[in-house]
């Protein structure tokens, strides 16, 4: 059968993704020791829960401190409920409900109750339906709580208690101090410091004079929870890139993935990111948390994600034990509420660029040091759609020598086809002899049957890097081109009155055009002489399947990615036509092969050894027949 080169952006690309997924699943398969450790951890967790339940039964449940402490009766009630923190109950009515902290980019509303951010608004962005982008809205989708025990045998939660706000400034910086008081000089403080034109907010948790209040024998636990608010037109597409990511052990990073997942314990965690595709909430700490546990849960199933009214995608939690230092809490942290933009995150020099899924290994390197800088240059001069086309043209031109080598290999194999068929017919009953004669023919003719595959494999890093680049390119968000309103989302030329499984309820034109281009290219490269040998895949079936997969798979993907595939295959078709009709001459190739056959060939050690092994195998086979 004539050796063919199939479209890199379909067969090899999808095959690579499948292999990577299988490899990751295999590599992440837990060992027996890990399973035993997991079982042990689970048992310890059950015991800990039992212990906590006993403690809760022994302690009084803390009610919301809405009572009036202006008289002795109210104060006595507060002391019964809150113990030493009864002092803070007066802020339930005396203080403002919220305090606003804002700069040119970010607006935070901090609640007196709980001292945490009740609302986080990104000022310069809108959702797909022109609503302001909130990462936290009305305190409904996020919580931040410190659970601690006191020496008078109480279990308290900061989210139920009231903080005293104090807003000041330090030069251009705005500072908000939230204090949960036991006395004027004894308190637990959340301190926020916001700089101009920054998405990063300095955040400090510290206590003063609480050595005799905290129960050192009781765990102090920080719980941070957030549900990802939907911002994109396609909730399913946004959910695909919504995930929990964290850094641990001095620079390592990991993520929980797309399915419901629990990570019971990680050590030395330095930041935690709740990423919502194009927007991210990150908690960073200068003093790494010794341990942290995470969960990620899909709020809606796959079918529900297509519902136009869905409000949230995933729910994240982080549970972090805090440690006392000299009987006090002291943690210097930061909050990041902002875009998942590689350039912004990379500028902080805290490894936050790992939040952007640019691909692992060589794929990420190609994106970071080639495609991102080059695309920045293009977008500084051209509109984004034109920049994608120019980027595609440049990539295809750079890879054209590889395309040429691959097609040249096909042409040589085509010229040798009659002789190969003759060998196959002559030795149809002797597979060993047939293989031996075929290899000898290749050697005499100077043809390497693998030379058509190797160039294709060399393109895989570029293919997969771009496959990660376009869905992660924040700058494409809400940028229009031709009929596509948003290059970071799917384009729509028709809305269907129903939803097709795996396809959706709309028709996107760019995937259709890309599928047609792939089909034409595969017709050119496979041609009419496509043959299928026993035990080999049906090449004709693959030729039709690949464009169909493109059509379905990319109907809900970013139109910028589909635009790239369409233009890429269109250019490849043009390059192939030029190579076929202008550059490569079959007669000259045939003449060259005949010349090569006449030249004496020096066999290397490997070739000699292979020949000897094949001859020995043939002799053994003859001996068995006798």
Image: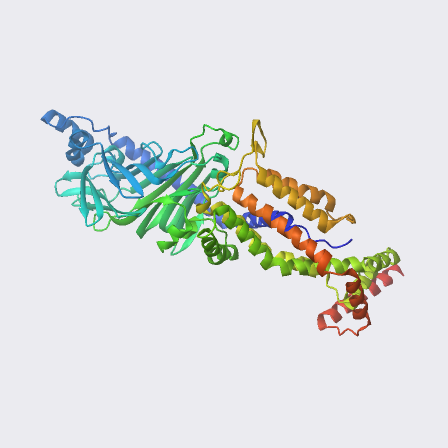
Furthest toward the left, the residue is 72
Colouring: rainbow
Q: In this view, does 229 lie to the left or right of 109?
A: right
Q: In this view, does 486 lie to the left or right of 138?
A: right
Q: How many marks?
A: 0
Q: Where is residue 405 in the image (x, y as percent from the top left)?
A: 68, 61
Q: Position of residue 30 (x, y in %)?
A: 51, 48
Q: In this view, does 348 lie to the left or right of 32?
A: left
Q: Residue at x 17, y 29 (%)?
A: 93
Residue 306 visible within the image? yes
Q: Work out whether residue 298 or residue 467 is closer to the camera in this orientation and state it.
A: 467
Q: Work out whether residue 80 or residue 596 is closer to the camera in this orientation and state it.
A: 596
Q: Work out whether residue 152 or residue 377 is closer to the camera in this orientation and state it.
A: 377
Residue 31 visible within the image? no
Vertical side of 224 occupied by 27: above or below: below
Q: Position of residue 596 (x, y in %)?
A: 78, 70
Q: Which residue is drawn at 69% across and 61% down?
A: 451
Q: Which quarter of the image is occupied by the C terminus?
A: bottom right
Q: Is residue 516 left or right of residue 289?
A: right
Q: Work out whether residue 483 or residue 101 is closer to the camera in this orientation and state it.
A: 483
Q: In which quarter of the image is residue 64?
A: top left
Q: Where is residue 47 in the image (x, y as percent from the top left)?
A: 37, 39
């Amino acid at each position: 059968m004539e050796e063919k080169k199939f479209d890199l952006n379909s067969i090899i690309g999808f095959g690579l993704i499948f292999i990577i997924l299988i490899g990751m699943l295999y590599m992440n398969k837990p060992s027996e020791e890990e399973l035993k450790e997991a079982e042990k951890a689970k048992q310890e967790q059950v015991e800990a829960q039992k212990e906590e339940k006993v403690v809760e039964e022994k302690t009084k449940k803390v009610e919301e401190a809405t009572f009036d402490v202006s008289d002795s009766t109210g104060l006595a009630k507060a002391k019964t409920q809150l113990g030493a923190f009864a002092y803070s109950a007066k802020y339930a009515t005396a203080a403002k409900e919220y305090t606003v902290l804002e700069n040119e980019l970010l607006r935070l509303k901090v609640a007196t109750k709980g001292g945490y951010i009740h609302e986080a608004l990104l000022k310069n962005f809108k959702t797909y339906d022109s609503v302001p982008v909130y990462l936290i809205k009305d305190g409904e989708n996020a919580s931040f709580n410190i659970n601690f025990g006191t020496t008078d045998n109480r279990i308290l939660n900061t989210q139920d208690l009231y903080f005293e706000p104090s807003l000041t400034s330090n030069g251009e910086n705005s500072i908000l101090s939230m204090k949960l008081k036991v006395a004027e000089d004894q308190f637990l403080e959340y301190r926020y410091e916001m700089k101009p034109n920054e998405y990063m907010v300095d955040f400090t948790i510290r206590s003063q004079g609480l050595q005799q209040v905290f129960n050192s024998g009781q765990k102090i636990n920080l719980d941070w929870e957030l549900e990802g608010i939907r911002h994109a037109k396609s909730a399913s597409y946004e959910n695909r890139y919504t995930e929990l990511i964290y850094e641990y052990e001095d620079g390592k990073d990991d993520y929980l993935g797309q399915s419901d997942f629990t990570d019971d314990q990680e050590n030395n965690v330095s930041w935690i990111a709740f990423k919502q595709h194009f927007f991210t909430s990150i908690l960073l700490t200068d003093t790494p948390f010794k341990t942290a546990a995470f969960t990620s849960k899909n709020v809606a199933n796959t079918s529900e994600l297509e519902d136009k009214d869905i409000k949230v995608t995933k729910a994240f939690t982080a549970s972090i034990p805090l440690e006392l230092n000299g009987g006090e809490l002291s943690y210097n942290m930061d909050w990041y509420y902002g875009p998942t933009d590689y350039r912004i995150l990379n500028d902080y020099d805290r490894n936050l660029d790992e939040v952007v899924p640019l691909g692992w290994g060589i794929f990420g390197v190609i994106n970071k040091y080639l495609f991102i800088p080059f695309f920045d240059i293009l977008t500084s001069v051209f509109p984004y759609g034109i920049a994608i086309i120019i980027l595609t043209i440049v990539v295809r031109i750079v890879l054209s020598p590889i395309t040429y080598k691959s097609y040249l290999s096909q042409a040589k194999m085509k010229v040798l086809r009659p002789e190969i068929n003759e060998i196959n017919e002559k030795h149809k009953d002797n597979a060993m002899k047939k293989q031996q004669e075929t290899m000898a023919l290749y050697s005499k003719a100077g043809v390497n049957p693998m030379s058509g595959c190797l160039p294709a494999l060399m393109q895989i890093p570029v293919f997969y890097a771009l496959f990660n680049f376009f869905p992660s390119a924040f700058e494409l968000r809400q940028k229009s081109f031709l009929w596509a309103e948003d290059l970071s989302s799917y384009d729509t030329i028709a809305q269907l009155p129903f939803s097709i499984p795996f396809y959706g309820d709309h028709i996107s034109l760019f995937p259709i055009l890309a599928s047609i281009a792939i089909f034409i290219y595969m017709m050119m490269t496979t041609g009419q002489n496509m043959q299928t040998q026993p035990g080999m895949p049906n090449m004709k079936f693959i030729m039709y399947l690949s464009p169909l997969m493109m059509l379905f798979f990319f109907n809900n993907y970013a139109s910028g990615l589909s635009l790239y595939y369409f233009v890429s295959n269109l250019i490849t078709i043009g390059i192939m036509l030029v190579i076929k009709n202008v550059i490569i001459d079959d007669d000259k190739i045939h003449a060259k092969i005949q010349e090569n056959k006449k030249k004496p060939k020096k066999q290397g050690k490997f070739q000699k050894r292979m020949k000897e092994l094949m001859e020995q195998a043939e002799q053994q086979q003859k001996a068995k027949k006798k």
